[in-house]
Amino acid sequence: MLHENEVLMFLLGLGVLVFILTNRLKFKSIPASKILFIGYLLLLVGWFSTVFEGYFFENVLNYLEHTCYAISAIFIAVWCWKVFGSKEETG
Amino acid sequence: MHPVAIFDFVTFLASLAALAILLIGWKRAFQNETKFVFAGTLIFTFLYGLCLFLEWSGITKALETLEDLTGALLPMWWAFILYALLREVAEKELLTSEQKFKDLTETTSDWIWEVNAEGVYTYVNPKVEDLLGYEVSEVMGKTPFDFMSEDEGKRISRFFKERVLRKEPFFGLENECICKDGREVILETSGIPIFDEQGQVCGYRGIDRDITERKKIEQMKDNLVRDVSHTLKSPLATAKMACDMTKKGIESNDMERIKSGQNIVVNNIKRSIHDIESILKVSIVGERKKIAEKEELSLSAIVNGIIEDLKDSIDEKHLDVKVNIPEDADKLYARRGEVMTLLNNLIDNSVKFTEKGNISIAVEPKKNEIEIRVEDTGCGISPESVGKVFEKFYKRHAALPGMGLGLTICKEIVERHNGKIEVTSKGEGKGATVIVRLPRLQ
C-alpha cells in the first residue's frame, strides 16, 4: 500500500543525497564526514524500505527499515561523540 | 510486542544519547545556528523512534499522526543540517584561505599590489612602507605614476595603457620610483590582468621588487670589466712598445736603448702583477680565506721597505717623505702579509695622488692601540666622495690611476684586525689623511 508521506519522505531524502553528492568535496571537510554519510545513507535505505515494503518482501523490508533506523541513529550518536564529545574545543 | 520494536527503542535511545552529547559539548564545535538545526534533527529522530516504538510494541497507536509528521519532516531537517554544516565548513575554509593570503602578503619581501583599470591602487601590502617609506593608507587611492618623476610616470603610464588595451600581462618592467625621503629606487614590476564577467580588464594584480642594489652591482660589474680591461691593457701596450724599442736597440747595438726598454718592460710587468694581485686580494680578503697567524711586527721595517720599493716614483716627483715611528709604537701584533698590504696601499695611494709636496707617515701609541697616520699634500677628496672611498671599484674620476680597490682592501684588513680606518680631506687639491687604529696586542 502506498503512503504519500512515505514516498515524499523518500524523495526528499534522495534530493538530500543528490545535494551531498554534488557537494562531496566540501562534504569531506566536515569532521568525521564518513560516519555522518553512512548514518544518512542508512536512514535513506530505511525510507526506501518503508516505501517498497508494500509491494514486495514486506517482512524483510520492514525489518530492514527498523534496523537501518537503529544503526543510523547509532552512527549519528558516534558522530556527535567524535565532534562534540572530544575534550579539545574545535569551534 | 513485535521484534522490530527493539530496533525502534535503540533508535530512540541512540538519538537521545546524541542529543545529550550535543548539549554537553555545545561549546566545542560549530556555530550556534548549526547546532540548533542539528538539535532539531535529533529531536525529530528521537520523536520518530519513540512513536515507532510505541506503535510496534503495542503500547499505543495514538501517536501515529505525530509519527507521520516527524518522519515526513526528517529529510527536510537533514537538508537543513547538511546545508548549515557545508556553509560553515566553506566559511571556515574561506577564513583560513584569507588568513594564508594575509600571512603571505604581509611576510613576503615583495610589494604586492592591485590596481583598477585606471591604475589606482585598490590594495597594497605593508611592504610598501619598507620600499617607499609611505604608509599603506598614503598609497591607497593613488597611482604608481604618482610616485615617479614626470618623465618616468609618462613612460610607465603609456606602457600600462597599452597593456590594458591588449589585455596582456607584463613581467620584469623596470621603473624608477621616488621614496618619501626623496631617494630613488629601481623597482622590477610584474602584473597580470584581472578580468570582469564580460572579459574586460578591470585591473591588474602583481608584485614590485626592489632591484636598486642589483642594478648597482650590475653597474659595478660593468665598471669592473671596463677598468680591469683598461688597467691590464695599458701596461701591456707600453711593454709592447718597450719590446720594439729593445729590438731596435739590439739591431743598432744601442745598450742604453736596450736597458731603458728592458726597464720599461719590467716596470710594466710589475704594474700588471700588482693590479692582478689587488683583484685577488679583494677576493681573498672578502671571502676571509687563507687567514694567516698573527706575529710581532716592526712597523718601521715594513714602512721603510715600502718606501724603498716606491723610491723611483718618489724621486721622480721629488716628494718629501717623512717617517715618524717612535720606538714604543714600533711593535704591532698582527698578520704580516695583511699589514704590509695595508701600509703599501696607503703609502702607494699617497705617492700616486701627490704630484708635489710631502707625505708624512706617523705612528702614535695610544692606550691599547696604535694610530697610523698617512698624510699627503696631494689631490685630496671632495666632501661628497669621502664616504665612498671604501666602496669596491670606486674611483672619483675614471681617468685616475688604479682600480679603486686599494682602500677597500685596507678597510677589510683593518676590520679583520678589529681596528678602525677613516679618511679625511679638506677638499679637492687640499691633500688627504688616512688614519688607521689597530689594537696593539691580541
Image (tube, coloured by chain):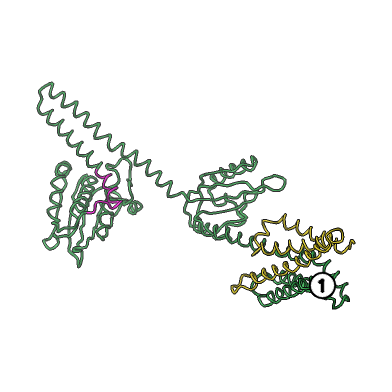
In the image, residue B178 above or below residue A32: above
- Position in image of residue B60 (x %, y %): 86, 77
Amino acid carrying mark 1 in the image = His
Lateral position of residue A42 relative to residue B70, left or right: left
Residue at the (61%, 59%) spot, across then down: B97
Tell me, what hue is chain A? yellow
Q: Report if residue B285 lies within the magenta region.
A: yes
Numbered-mark total: 1
Give coordinates of residue B287: x percent, y percent.
30, 51
User: Residue B282 magenta-drawn?
Assistant: yes
Q: Nearer the viewer, residue B348 or A89?
A: A89
Q: Is residue B3 left or right of residue B392?
A: right
State the green chain: B
Q: Which residue is mark 1?
A: B2
Highlighted magenta segment, given as a residue range: B277-291
Please tell me whether the stretch drawn in magenta is mainly helix, strand or loop: helix
Q: Which quarter of the image is occupied by the N terminus of chain B?
A: bottom right
Out of B438 and B363, give the one closest to the viewer.
Answer: B438
Residue B223 image point, x, y percent: 36, 41
Kindly identify the residue that appears in the image at 72 percent across and 58 percent down: A20
